[in-house]
Image (tube, rainbow, N blue to C red):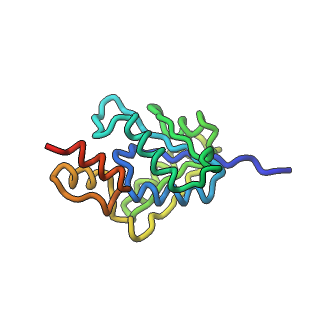
């Protein structure tokens, strides 16, 4: 009997998409048949980029991760509920979480425990960020961009261009 399709949900704000996000996404595509990138949309938060802009950025950079005949393996969606419910909504049995350091691990272990209690059928998978991108956070990238700094080492070229346009005086 053939194995069922392994669907993974990779949630985040992706505001903006960073090289760290791409690193984790690339690893996720290596372990899942399909990855659903879920952009969290929260009415109380004011992101730098709109949901539509973040979808465009993710779709643009995803093209670099997969050959043309495998683009169907990646989907970009929004969610405004519990991440574990979003995973269930999309048929995901894996929940992808990137780890940069021990601080991330402590927090993510708590979340994994809570999520496992809520939906035992969804397994949290921790993917360590590669050493060269471990220091990158979207928060720091936004701060650097807002202060006129160069972001090209932290984000894909198209995202760096969009950041420069957003923060241009």
Looking at the picture, tell me which residue is in the foreground, 75 or 164: 164
Looking at the picture, tell me which residue is in the foreground, 161 or 117: 161
- For image coordinates 33% across by 56% down, the residue present is 137
Determine the residue located farthest toward the left in the rendered image: 169
- For image coordinates 21% across by 55% down, the residue present is 144
Seen in the picture, residue 93 relative to 43 is either above or below; the reply is: below
Residue 100 located left or right of residue 112:
left
Seen in the picture, residue 84 relative to 104 is either above or below; the reply is: above
- For image coordinates 39% across by 70% down, the residue present is 132
Q: Quadrant of the C terminus?
A: top left
- For image coordinates 34% across by 47% down, the residue present is 16
Determine the residue located farthest toward the front in the rendered image: 68
Q: Position of residue 33 (x, y in %)?
A: 66, 51
Residue 165 located left or right of residue 27:
left
Residue 33 located left or right of residue 24:
right
Q: Which quadrant holds residue 168?
A: top left
Q: Which quadrant holds residue 27?
A: bottom right
Determine the residue located farthest toward the top in the rendered image: 43
Q: How many marks?
A: 0
Residue 14 located left or right of residue 59:
left
Q: Position of residue 138 (x, y in %)?
A: 32, 52
- Residue 122 in view (yes/no): no
Q: Which quadrant holds residue 13?
A: top left
Q: Position of residue 156 (x, y in %)?
A: 38, 56
- Residue 14 in view (yes/no): yes
Q: Position of residue 98 (x, y in %)?
A: 46, 57
Determine the residue located farthest toward the right in the rendered image: 1
Seen in the picture, residue 11 relative to 150 is either above or below; the reply is: above
């Amino acid at each position: 009997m053939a194995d069922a399709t392994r669907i993974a949900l990779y949630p985040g704000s992706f505001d903006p998409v960073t090289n760290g996000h791409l690193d984790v996404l690339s690893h996720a595509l290596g372990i899942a048949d399909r990855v659903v990138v879920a952009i969290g949309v929260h009415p109380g938060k004011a992101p730098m980029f709109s949901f539509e802009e973040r979808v465009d950025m993710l779709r643009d950079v995803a093209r670099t991760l997969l050959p043309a005949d495998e683009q169907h393996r990646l989907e970009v969606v929004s969610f405004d509920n519990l991440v574990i419910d979003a995973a269930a909504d999309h048929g995901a049995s894996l929940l992808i979480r990137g780890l940069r350091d021990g601080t991330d691990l402590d927090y993510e272990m708590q979340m994994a425990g809570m999520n496992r209690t809520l939906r035992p059928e969804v397994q949290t998978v921790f993917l360590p960020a590669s050493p060269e991108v471990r220091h990158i956070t979207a928060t720091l990238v936004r701060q650097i961009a807002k202060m006129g700094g160069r972001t090209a080492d932290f984000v894909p070229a198209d995202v760096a261009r969009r950041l420069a346009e957003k923060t241009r005086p």
